[in-house]
Image (cartoon, grey):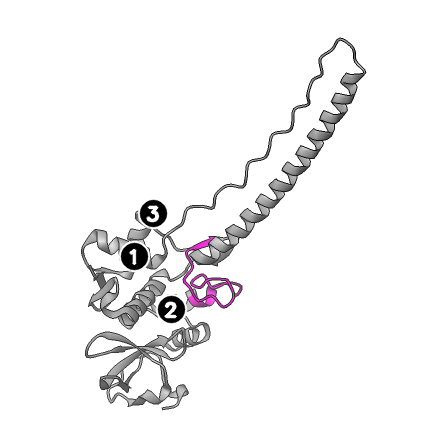
Amino acid sequence: MRPEQIEIGAEYRCRLERGVVRVRVDGAAEGGGWMVTDVEAGQPEHVRRHEQFRERWSTPAPAYPADVAETIAETGAYPPPLDRIDGERLANDVKSRPAEFDPDRCATPRCKREPAMTYLGKPLCQACWEAATRETTNDGAESAAKETTMSKKSASKKTTKTSKATKTTKGKKPVAAKPKAERKPAGDAKSKRLSALDAAAEVLRKSGKPMRSQEMIAAMAEQGLWSSPNGKTPQATLYAAILREIGTKRGAARFKKVERGQFAFNG
């Protein structure tokens, strides 16, 4: 099949490693291709080439609303399952995102990691935030070192002038000039914060029961582990990230899918 014939939310006969199976297209993958779900096994898969799609399933699944499918195709947003989507709300949320930065992606060019915090108005992942704060800390340390050197030179000049003055003064003891106090080096970087995916794994481990992505987002915020950096649909982003980890790490993943839309900690 041609790429333009593949629709998000529709079902197709698709050739995977285990043979031709029935799959549902969930959305576009970050590295190219499509993220699909094996309808029979309920297992997420990554289809890289459009030639793997054979034909549309004889009884097509209900597709996303036209406006939602259009906004997903334009922005590359990963949608939640059809049975939990509010079409009008998702369409408005995606359209209302600022054009400058996507709150669900790191603002650093060519960085594809998930943002963990907002720094100077930009959503940044943990690694990019550490790099930015490290540059700021180094600049502050260099400025402090220059000012310390200048203060030492000034103090030495005052000491020299004082010693010369004491030579011409009789009956008085020379008084050495006191150098200025050195500035303290720049403070340490802020303590590291958990990413949304790590926080979700911690919440599931503590709860010991299956949860949906929306419930995990609420529990993460309540426990102070992670909160969305102005994201409109953090539950959709978390849902996609969990599916990617399950599809990539399989048995070694921290999550396992219990029912449709529900995940548990894979301990």
Q: Are marks 2 and 1 in contact (CB under 8 Å)?
A: no
Pointer 1 residue: 200
In the current view of this chain or complex, which residue is farthest to the top? 171
241 with respect to 160 (left or right): left
* Residue 204: percent from left, percent from top: 24, 56
Q: Amino acid at mark 1?
A: Ala
Above or below: residue 247 compared with residue 23: above
Please state which of the two labelled residues, at mark 2 or mark 3, is closer to the viewer. 3
- Of pointers 2 and 3, the one earlier in the residue sequence: 2
* Residue 81: percent from left, percent from top: 29, 70
Pointer 3 residue: 224
Q: Considering the whole magenta stretch, tell me its main secondary structure.
A: loop
Query: Which picture quadrant has residue 69?
Result: bottom left
Q: Are marks 1 and 3 in contact (CB under 8 Å)?
A: no
50 with respect to 83 (left or right): right
Residue visible at 78% across and 10% down in the picture: 170
